[in-house]
Amino acid sequence: SVLLRSAVKYRNNIYLLELGELYLFFQQMKIDSNPYIRHYCLMSLSVNEIFYSIEGETTSAGFPSVFVRLSGCNLNCRNCDTPHAKEHGREMSIDEIVDRVSRYGNAHHITVTGGEPLIQNDTIRLLETLTKINLSVQIETNGSVSLKTIPNGVRKIVDIKTPSSSEENSFNMDNLKYIDQNDEIKFVISHDRDLTFARNFIEMYLSDIKAVINLSPSYNKMLCNELANKILEKKLNVRLNLQLHKILGIK
């Protein structure tokens, strides 16, 4: 497995240590460690689950992915499909997470999701670490938290909440300037009011955005072919986003 290690020279001896061992090493040797290293070793996140499955959404759908689902969320969406992620999780250091992810082998990409992953302080450091070991990384976010500090190379999958979620005013409009052609935007559609909201938002704010725009039928609330027909009827230049994992009956 891929492990991040640091070489530490102390009294002419070289110690090859995993990141999580560094702080303990400094304590045992009674060395005043660099504050940055000490802080890094203590970095941790609340993780709901880590699992390997087929990517179900966006243009990455169909590829094997390792999912890192972080705990906690700042919204209360009526149509949330992962309510278990809001409160339940266990603390894991960044190097523990990277070690777990690396055990799954040759995944197409890593998906950091939630909950809302960006509400945790050390999520950005996790993203930086994953990209530095040459893993393809994407983050799924509800759009309410600033995207400004997301590292270059991390693909952003950004929700814009529709009225059926009861959180249609949650989108951080400043985030539009951080979305580029490598990213994707998603609207979940439960009924015609959601579709009207998405259509108006696209016309008003997304006409110059190069990112892929996805319309996703809300599971068990709008049929896939119904939304497909509405996209064609209204001549919307968007992608029909089906939840492949739910169609396949997998996680």
Image (cartoon, rainbow, N blue to C red):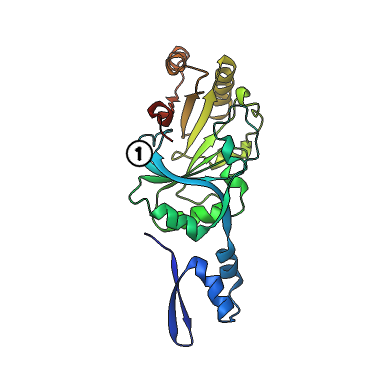
Q: Give the farthest residue toward the bottom.
A: 11
Position in image of residue 224 (x %, y %): 44, 18
Q: Is residue 203 above or below residue 26?
A: above
Position in image of residue 150 (x %, y %): 53, 49
Q: Could you tell me which residue is drawn at 49 percent across and 67 percent down?
A: 19
Please identify the quadrant where the N terminus is shown: bottom left
Q: Is residue 184 above or below residue 25?
A: above
Position in image of residue 125 (x %, y %): 54, 56
Regarding residue 67, the answer to whether it shows in the image is no
Q: Quadrant of residue 130?
A: bottom left
Q: Could you tell me which residue is drawn at 42 percent across and 52 percent down?
A: 101
Q: Could you tell me which residue is drawn at 44 percent across and 45 percent down?
A: 51
Q: Could you tell me which residue is drawn at 45 percent across and 87 percent down?
A: 12
Residue beneath disc 1: 63
Position in image of residue 183 (x %, y %): 47, 39
Q: Is residue 32 above or below residue 179?
A: below
Please identify the quadrant where the C terminus is shown: top left
